[in-house]
Amino acid sequence: MEAVQTQALGQLSKPDWSCIAVADQADGDPTVVTNDRALREVALRRDLNAEWGTHFLIRTFKACGITVPDFAEGIDTYLADVTLPAEVVTEVRNTEK
């Protein structure tokens, strides 16, 4: 092995930096929605709005932004894509529908 490339804990990936760049260049008042602590912290340090993805999902659902069938269809995929504490998973699954 000639070289091993690693990322330091908390370092942003290229897609993360792309997200920051899009938000930096967007008109209006964009919000970075993520469950990645490092990405959220960089967004906040750059004076961008940032919101936890789980909070966004629950708030959107409670505001009737998505239907119950769409929520039910996507919830397992969402939960598989993010790493959440068990109590948060329970809260997401049991949010008032």
Image (tube, grey):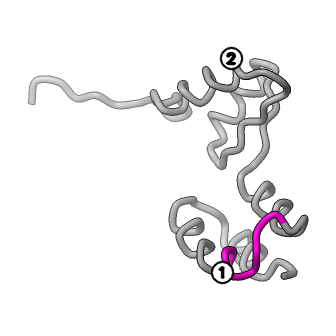
Q: Amino acid at mark 1?
A: Ala
Left or right of 12? Residue 88 is right
Q: Residue at x 82, y 77 (%)?
A: 95
Expressed as whole percent of the image width and height from the top left, the position of residue 9 reads 50, 35
Left or right of 89? Residue 64 is right
Asked whether disc 2 touches disc 1, contact meaning CB atoms under 8 Å apart, the reply is: no
Expressed as whole percent of the image width and height from the top left, the position of residue 75 reads 62, 73
Indicate whether 85 appears above or below 70. above
Furthest toward the left, the residue is 1
Look at the numbered disc 2 and give the secondary structure of its residue. helix
**Residue 70 part of the magenta segment:** yes
Q: Which residue is mark 2?
A: 25
Q: Earlier in the sequence, mark 2 or mark 1?
A: 2
In the rendered image, which quarter is residue 82 located in? bottom right
Q: Which residue is mark 1?
A: 72
Expressed as whole percent of the image width and height from the top left, the position of residue 3 reads 17, 24
Q: 10 Å neighbourhood of mark 1: few (<14), some, or many (≥20)?
A: few
In the rendered image, which quarter is residue 33 located in? top right
Choose between 70 and 13: the one closer to the eye: 70
Q: Which mark is residue 86?
A: none
Furthest toward the right, the residue is 63
> Which range of residues does the magenta coloring cover?
65-71
Look at the numbered disc 1 and give the secondary structure of its residue. helix
The N terminus appears in which quarter of the rendering? top left
Indicate whether 20 appears above or below 68. above
Q: Residue at x 80, y 57 (%)?
A: 55
Q: Amino acid at mark 2?
A: Gln
Distance from the alpha carbon under mark 2 to that under mark 1: 34 Å
Indicate whether 1 appears above or below 59. above
Left or right of 96? Residue 17 is left
